[in-house]
Amino acid sequence: MAMSLASSKGTRRGRGRSRRPMSEINVTPFVDVMLVLLIIFMVTAPLLTAGVPIELPDSRANALPQEAQQVSISIDSDGYVYIDDTQIAVGGLPDALENIPRQGEGPDITLRADRSLDYGRVMAVMGELNRAGLNRISLITNGGQASAPVNPGSSSEE
């Protein structure tokens, strides 16, 4: 019996009994994970705005506020039309425009067109939008940059 008392009351060599629970939270792993997530979101956020690679023209116009009900229509340098990220078959634009969900006045259309496109191609897409009853159209450009100079002698108002 003396041996059992000595082993239970003796020195504190047992692993579980000598340590008290830690009352502080180690935030270093949490901060590491947050920094990695921050970097991931900073890199991917600009890529989420538009999936179709287009070289936009430059403009000095002010940016418009973003609306909740918005559809992005893009025309790439080859003339193919995309609604959001979905390519529309040639001649299938009127049917695709009819399938766009509408509430109230309809969605705001943001039209992105490559700078190398013919003006007639952009106007043809805008005509189809008008025919489908989608009249709230915003043309997207590279804002805040110096645009090409305007020809001073091209206006008949002088």
Image (tube, rainbow, N blue to C red):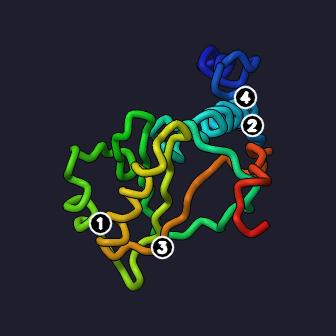
Q: Is residue 10 left or right of residue 138?
A: right
Whether residue 45 is visible, yes or no, is no
Circle 3 residue = 136
* Alpha-carbon span between mark 2 and mark 4: 21 Å
Task: Identify the disc placed on residue 19.
Answer: 4
Circle 1 residue = 100
- Residue at 65%, 17% (x, y): give it: 7
Q: Is residue 49 left or right of residue 93?
A: right
Q: Residues within 10 Å of mark 1 (few under 14, many from 20)?
A: few
Look at the numbered disc 3 and give the secondary structure of its residue: loop
In the rendered image, residue 10, in percent from the top left (x then y), is placed at: 73, 19
Relative to 145, is 20 above or below? above
Q: Residues within 10 Å of mark 2 (few under 14, many from 20)?
A: few
Task: Identify the disc placed on residue 40.
Answer: none
In the rendered image, residue 60, in percent from the top left (x then y), is placed at: 76, 54
The amino acid pointed to by label 3 is Arg
